[in-house]
Image: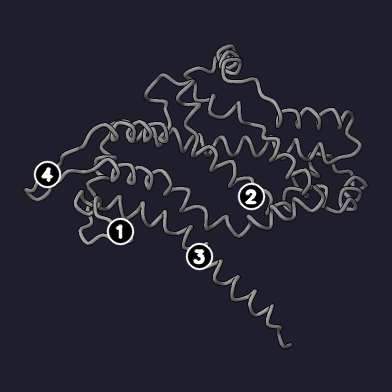
């Protein structure tokens, strides 16, 4: 079928726009990676910094020499794995209950959930609640306060409502309990939305640092994001000198910041390609009956 001039123009414009958009997305990562591998002489040069002629790992060495980096990574990994599993389980159970029209008080529970999207207690009341629950300096403070996300529950509920009701009715006639229906029918059919929620929750836990700053005083319990933030802040105020092959080379703050940024994002960046194929499907299917 022959295309009109308008359709051809739109296709050309669309390709050009997507190329530009792709470059805008890729360039910041390449710039950060290049700066993290650059010496002072290369980092202060003008230009796009898409590659470096004299790569060095000195910024990574300085970032990883911190004595608390190992335990901070452990805390972050533990938080991400345990927090993601717990939040996913609670969110899916809540969403399944709200998807059932026969649930007593369903509208009340839905309104309570939506209320949390509009209002929160603020920093000081939240701190007092955390203190009252004896969660200060406790790793559980990373997990328990964020068990429920209203947005995640709404996405999962919409997905559950898109599953044919006949499956639920057939299972009831066969004598299955609600929990059995949830685990053996709804969960296996919801792989796309589950993987989408896993991605959102895991990235949120991995990038979080403010709760560690507010609620944790023990240096052995802080997360890696807070530790890297402190390292980046200290790099702003001083220049670190190091010796490489007998020559004194100054490692600029921008190279340390770039190295810590790469260190922080690399684990999630490695996992994302395995989950991305479920991402769009989960969002779109979950929004069909939103």
Which element type, helix, strand or loop, lies under badge 2?
Answer: helix
For marks 2 and 3, give the CA distance.
27 Å
Q: Sequence order check: which comes first, mark 1 or mark 3?
A: 3
Disc number lying in front (2 or 1): 1
Disc number lying in front (4 or 2): 4
Image coordinates of residue 268 in percent, x first then y, are 48, 48
Q: Are marks 4 and 2 in contact (CB under 8 Å)?
A: no
Which element type, helix, strand or loop, lies under badge 1?
Answer: loop
Could you tell me which quadrant the N terminus lies in? bottom right
Asked if residue 143 is positioned above or below residue 58 in the image, the reply reads above
Few, some or many C-alpha atoms within 10 Å of disc 1 (few <14, some 14-19, many ≥20)? few
Relative to 52, is 261 on the left or the right?
right
Q: Which mark is residue 196?
A: 2
Q: Sequence order check: which comes first, mark 2 or mark 1?
A: 1
Q: Sequence order check: which comes first, mark 4 or mark 3?
A: 3
Disc number lying in front (4 or 3): 3
Q: Which residue is mark 1?
A: 47
Which element type, helix, strand or loop, lies under badge 3?
Answer: helix
Disc number lying in front (1 or 4): 1
For marks 1 and 3, give the CA distance.
19 Å
For marks 2 and 1, give the CA distance.
38 Å
Q: Which residue is mark 4?
A: 243
Asked if residue 57 is positioned above or below residue 53 in the image, the reply reads above
Residue at left offset 66%, top offset 24%: 120
Relative to 148, is 110 on the left or the right?
right
């Amino acid at each position: 079928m022959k295309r009109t001039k308008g359709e051809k123009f739109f296709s050309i414009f669309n390709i050009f726009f997507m190329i530009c958009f792709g470059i805008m997305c890729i360039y910041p990562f390449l710039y950060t990676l290049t700066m993290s591998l650059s010496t002072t002489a290369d980092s202060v040069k003008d230009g796009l910094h898409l590659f470096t002629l004299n790569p060095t790992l000195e910024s990574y060495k300085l970032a990883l020499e911190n004595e608390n980096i190992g335990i901070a990574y452990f805390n972050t990994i533990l938080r991400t794995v345990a927090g993601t599993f717990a939040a996913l389980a609670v969110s899916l159970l809540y969403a399944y209950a709200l998807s059932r029209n026969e649930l007593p008080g369903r509208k009340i529970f839905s309104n309570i959930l939506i209320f949390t999207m509009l209002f929160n207690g603020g920093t000081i009341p939240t701190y007092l609640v955390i203190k009252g629950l004896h969660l200060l300096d406790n790793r559980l403070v990373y997990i328990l306060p964020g068990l429920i996300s209203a947005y995640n529950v709404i996405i999962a509920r919409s997905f559950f409502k898109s599953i044919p009701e006949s499956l639920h009715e057939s299972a009831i006639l066969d004598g299955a309990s609600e929990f059995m229906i949830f685990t053996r029918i709804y969960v296996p059919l919801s792989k796309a939305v589950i993987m989408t929620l896993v991605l959102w929750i895991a990235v949120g836990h991995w990038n979080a640092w403010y709760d560690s700053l507010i609620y944790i005083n023990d240096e052995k319990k802080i997360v890696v994001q807070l530790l890297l933030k402190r390292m980046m802040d200290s790099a702003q105020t001083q220049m670190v000198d190091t010796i490489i092959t007998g020559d004194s080379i100054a490692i600029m703050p921008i190279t340390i910041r770039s190295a810590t940024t790469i260190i922080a994002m690399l684990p999630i960046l490695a996992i994302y390609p395995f989950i991305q194929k479920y991402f769009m499907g989960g969002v779109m299917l979950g929004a069909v009956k939103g």
